[in-house]
Image: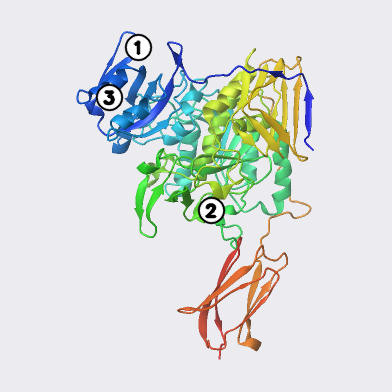
Amino acid sequence: MNKLVCFLLFLFSLNGVFAQETHYEKEVFHYLVTLTQPESLSIQKLENGVLEIKNPQNNRETRLFKENYVLVFQPLFPNTQKEHLKKIYRISTTSNTLLGKLQNENPGLYTKIEPFDPPPPNAYFPNDYGTTSPVENHGGPYPLTGLDLINAPGAWGITTGDKKVVIGISDGRVDSTNTDLVGRVSNYLKYFNNSKGTVCYHGTGIAGVIGAKMDNSFGIPGICSDCDLITNGYARFDYIQELIEAGAKVVNASWSLCGFGSYHQNVQERINEYYEEGILIVAAAGNGSKCNPSLKDYASNYTYPASYKNVISVTSVYAACGHYEDCVIQDEQYGEIHYKLKDRHVRRQRKTETGFIPINSKFATQHNLSVDLAAPAETFSIGRAMCGEEEEFTGLSSVSAAVVTGVIGLIWSANYCLASIEVESILKLTSEDIENLPGNEPFKMKLGAGRVDAYRAVKMADAMQQEKGIVTVSNRDFYRFNFELFSSPYQIQIQNQTFRDSSTVDFKARKRIMLKPGTRLVPDKNGFVKLSIDPGLPTEECFPAPVKSRPKVEKDSISNYPKFTKPFEIKRAPEIEGIFIELMEGGVDTEYLVVIKTDKEVFRKSFSKEENASIPLETIKNEMITITITSDLYRIQKKLKVNIQ
């Protein structure tokens, strides 16, 4: 039975809302198109703002341009050093058929046409934005496609941060002399002096992603460049607690463990306390961590602190290539493959007639039910060169977590009154749906709510604190997660939006909540929807609360440390001159296959999931064998010598 609790009269509006810009009272459509010979066109701007475009070699093409308004025709990446990106143009026109007609007329010139969402009018591009910047770039010579993907410039048009938002960085060395970080870190609780290795560069790179100086003609722009930064060590919960007690509103932990030992459960309880007080911890989901080595898919393992409840767990997607035809490489094993496709979780993909198949997903960053969000995996790392590392464009879930931490800094800069659950809800409500993209289907429910979108998130946070702001929840289909908005939004409108199955919704507004066309509220017995109005919600500005001091986390009275046992025990069996495979407590998930090899395969057979396996090998004497056991979930391999004489 659907559980729907409503405390207001719903106001339905049938008026459509157009997202496109208008010109001469017409809709404007935006496209990306690859031009093989852009120099064949002559472009001139007329007094009315419309572009006059001609192809001296093709009168029909010129006539098509004349019959339609074209408002924008410009390179998408004017600073790029990549040849294929130099040919991508952004076109805005009042005709939704012009590009198709142009391609029919001149298919050799107009290729790879696709719709495009332009940056919002107030988007801000700093002078160190990278080679995909539409303005002159004086920063690092790298394409910061991750910033493009999350629409960071749109968010920066609203805020670039606020000093009252303190971001804690639990990591290795953060270089205080780096040009992008000089003066950015107000408190070093722990400082590492390592001159090489991961501890030398990792923290500097993460700090750069979160809060490097913006507009300084160097390196990269940090996502929250005007937030305050403090740093401490890593891989211990004490370091996180020390950052919080030094004033951190959000803590970034771009590291992962298989658990916190005898402190595991008490760490969870402390995290819950921080969450209730409006403090967030963001953690990298992990980079294919092998906490349970028996799993076939290493990246499905759960790591900590990311897998704790009330920690924002972040996995990775790629942003390098917007169109699959621009990302083709040759692989020794798989032949022609596609590499780092936009919003795909796995780096390498094989194209099929129906979509893409990820290659070696077990080596991807973590994907599991604890993941909350995905974010871009790679960027220009400002710390690596000084530590002797040649590769400067890099990153995995460490960078992804830092991206989300920076966005949270912007959210709280726009609206400091938001509770932890509201910040998490905003991040998820405004995220881009990616789990249904070709190549991501195997990770259904394992990539979180979606890929973070900085502009949408900051825009929603900002609207919630405006006197008569309108918060729009739209264009997603959620079947899980908990969503709460209650910090004084004036009006909430829900449009083309579904909340179903086990998703829970608790929205409160001062004036009204409107259900617009396309809205479906159909929770099951595990979910609910509660919508209410409270004109008395407070609207005062919020400021940092006094920091609470707590004792360090004590050891658990009862051990809850994650333990992993092998599903099989493989033993020699002299009585049958072979081996015996015993199912351990808890059993195996499906039937399992046993393959035994010497220098060649000597045995292959499947067994039921309740069946132990007795396998005679009387013809093999004093020889090393390799036993491989696989089920849907597990893969175990062991070498041993049998029938020793």
Picture coordinates of residue 409 (x, y %)? 57, 29
Q: Is residue 582 left or right of residue 23?
A: right
Q: Residue at x 26, y 21 (%)?
A: 62
Query: The residue under label 2 is which amino acid type?
Result: Gly
Compared across the picture, whether 489 is left or right of 344 comes to right
Which numbered disc, 2 or 3, marks the residue closer to the eye?
A: 3
Quadrant showing the C terminus:
bottom right
Q: Amino acid at mark 3?
A: Glu
User: As drawn, which residue projects farthest toward the left?
Assistant: 57
Q: Residues within 10 Å of mark 2 (few under 14, many from 20)?
A: many
- Identify the disc placed on residue 49: 1
Q: Nearer the viewer, mark 1 or mark 2?
A: 1
Decide which of 230, 324 is in the foreground and name it: 324
The furthest residue to the bottom: 645
Quadrant in the rendering for residue 596: bottom right
Badge 1 or badge 2: first in the primary sequence:
1
In primary-sequence order, the first of circles 1 and 3 is: 1
Point out residue 159 in the picture as x, y percentages from the top left corner: 52, 21
Label 3 belongs to which residue? Answer: 61
Q: Nearer the viewer, mark 1 or mark 3?
A: 3
Callouts 2 and 3 close, C-beta under 8 Å: no
Q: Give the amino acid at mark 1.
A: Gly
How far apart marks 1 and 3 lie (CA) works out to 20 Å
Q: Name the residue tied to disc 2.
A: 288
Q: The residue tagged with tag 1: helix, strand or loop?
A: loop
First-in-chain label (2 vs 3) = 3
Question: Considering the image in quadrants, where does the N terminus appear?
Answer: top right
Could you give the CA–CA distance between mark 2 and mark 3, rounded to whole angstroms?
Answer: 52 Å
Q: Judge by depth and name the residue closer to the eye, 220 or 79.
A: 79
